[in-house]
Amino acid sequence: MPSTAVPVFNFTVAVTARGEWTWTFAPGVTESFDIPGSTYPDDEVSHTYTEVDHQTVILNTRWWGSFTVGEEGPWDIPTPATQGPYELPVEVVEATSALSG
């Protein structure tokens, strides 16, 4: 989990966060991951479409966390921070096979 510490007066405030990325690939097709995903060819976050078409993928992110002040805590942050929805246009193309030797 990512963490950051900031000096505030005579204390250090440290915040630790955990993210969840929820992708809606098509109506009724939603998956959540603890990683944001990355660009091709990384396929840890992926979806296989059955038809060539233009799609709109929707992304929502939620962040949970906790914090400490000096040596006190940690205390949970009770309400997650949210980002999104973000609409991402995607062009679905047909995969081609290739032989390699």
Image (tube, rainbow, N blue to C red):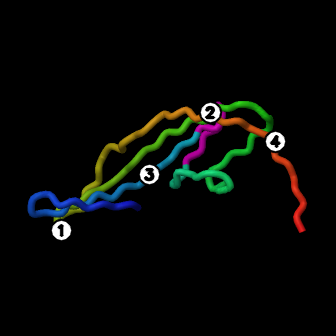
Sequence-earlier tag: 4 or 1: 1
Q: Which amino acid does label 3 sit on?
A: Gly
Q: Residues within 10 Å of mark 2 (few under 14, many from 20)?
A: few
Q: Which amino acid does label 2 sit on?
A: Pro
* Label 4 close to label 3 by CB (< 8 Å): no
Bounds of the magenta segment? 24-32
Let me know if residue 29 is in the magenta part: yes
Let me know if residue 76 is in the magenta part: no
Sequence-earlier tag: 1 or 2: 1
Identify the disc placed on residue 19: 3
- Classify mark 3: helix, strand or loop: strand
Percent position (x, y) of residue 25?
A: 64, 38
Sequence-earlier tag: 3 or 1: 3
Mark 4–mark 1 distance (CA, rounded to whole Å): 56 Å
Mark 2–mark 3 distance (CA, rounded to whole Å): 23 Å
Mark 4–mark 2 distance (CA, rounded to whole Å): 17 Å
Percent position (x, y) of residue 73?
A: 21, 62
**At 36% from the left edge and 55% from the top edge, which residue is drawn?**
17
Q: Quadrant of the C terminus?
A: bottom right
Q: In which quarter of the image is the N terminus?
A: bottom left
Identify the disc placed on residue 81: none
The image quadrant that residue 81 belongs to is top left
Residue position for label 2: 89
Residue position for label 4: 94
Residue position for label 1: 71
**At 58% from the left edge and 35% from the top edge, which residue is drawn?**
88
Sequence-earlier tag: 4 or 2: 2
- Classify mark 1: helix, strand or loop: loop
